[in-house]
Image (cartoon, rainbow, N blue to C red):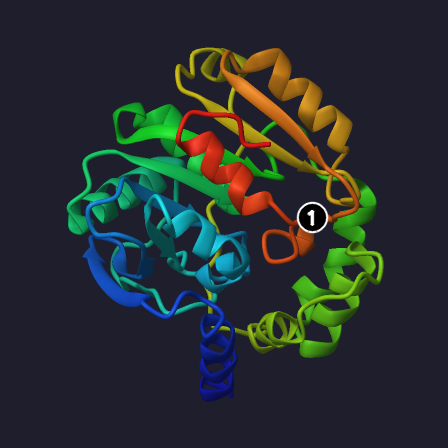
Amino acid sequence: MYDTDGFRAAYDKVMAKWPAEREAREVPTPYGSTYVNVCGPRDAPPLLLLPGGGATSASWYAQAADLAREHRVHAVDLIGDPGRSVPAGDRPLRTVADLTAWLDALLDGLGIGAADVGGHSYGAWIALHHALRSPRRVRRLFLLDPTQCFAGYKTAYLLHALPMLLRPSARSVRAFLEWETGGAPLDPDWLRLQEAAAGFPSVKPVTGPRPTPRALRGLDLPVLLLVAASGRTHDPRKVAARAEELLPHVETVVLPDVSHHALPHSAPPGTGRRLSGFLRGSSGS
């Protein structure tokens, strides 16, 4: 039987690294109840954060304080993934259109017309598709080493991920993360949360093709793309080059000495300030 209490204890330990004034909200949507961690001034511009697949909103702890100085941050646990969101039994998320409808309903439930949006990995894939399909709801967009947006996965990455996907366990999760991050030091509390998520009763994620070149060329909003230089998920140079080729308003930054799965919690110092600068419309450097 899955250790729900152990997962929640690990989740709460990482959430303790968030700003003290954080509050939690549970927002009903047609696809289930969405758990959102919120912080920042109530009258500040809203910012929606989406984690990577298999992660939770807790992973944004290293940037939360910086982002919450000028934004009302809303960090989401993805429905169907590890976390505290609860999927509806009779209306699962099955398509990209469902994901867009879910995020629209979530924004409505939060009382938000349009928001800045940021995502990591699979969360960045969701955020980009949402911006393409519901552009009136997205003001500015940042993508942290997005997967399946501008390039495909490396074969070696998929082969190393296979044992974790076929037989999820704390050991297989740790082995995979140690391989992908090159043995770099990882926050032990965050690592324990990733291990505790192994075997979480999640549902099949929505996947699909990359956005079409035509759709990307038509995205008329500012985008900040941060690429992990040491990531083993995809070719970082190809990701950056393809985004610069297709997106009309993109700023691309290559983050040195960091891998895909070390983001966002172990991003280089100053990443939160860079993101804040982009969101306010000034240089993030």
**Rendered residue at 32%/37% (across/down):** 100
Toward which corner of the image does residue 97 lie, by quadrant?
top left
Left or right of 269? Residue 230 is right
Q: Where 235 falls versus 82 (above or below)?
A: above
Left or right of 9? Residue 257 is right
Q: Where 28 falls versus 103 (above or below)?
A: below
Task: Give the x, y percent position of residue 181.
Answer: 78, 56
For the residue marked with disc 1, what is the amino acid? Answer: His
Residue placed most toward the observer, 98 or 51: 51
**Rendered residue at 76%/44% (across/down):** 231
User: Mark 1: which secondary structure?
Assistant: helix
Residue placed most toward the observer, 7 or 203: 7
Task: Give the x, y percent position of residue 86.
Answer: 32, 66
Residue placed most toward the observer, 209 or 198: 198
Query: Residue under circle 1?
Result: 260
Toward which corner of the image does residue 105 lie, by quadrant?
top left
The answer to whether residue 121 is seen in the rendering is no
Left or right of 20? Residue 172 is right
The answer to whether residue 57 is seen in the rendering is yes
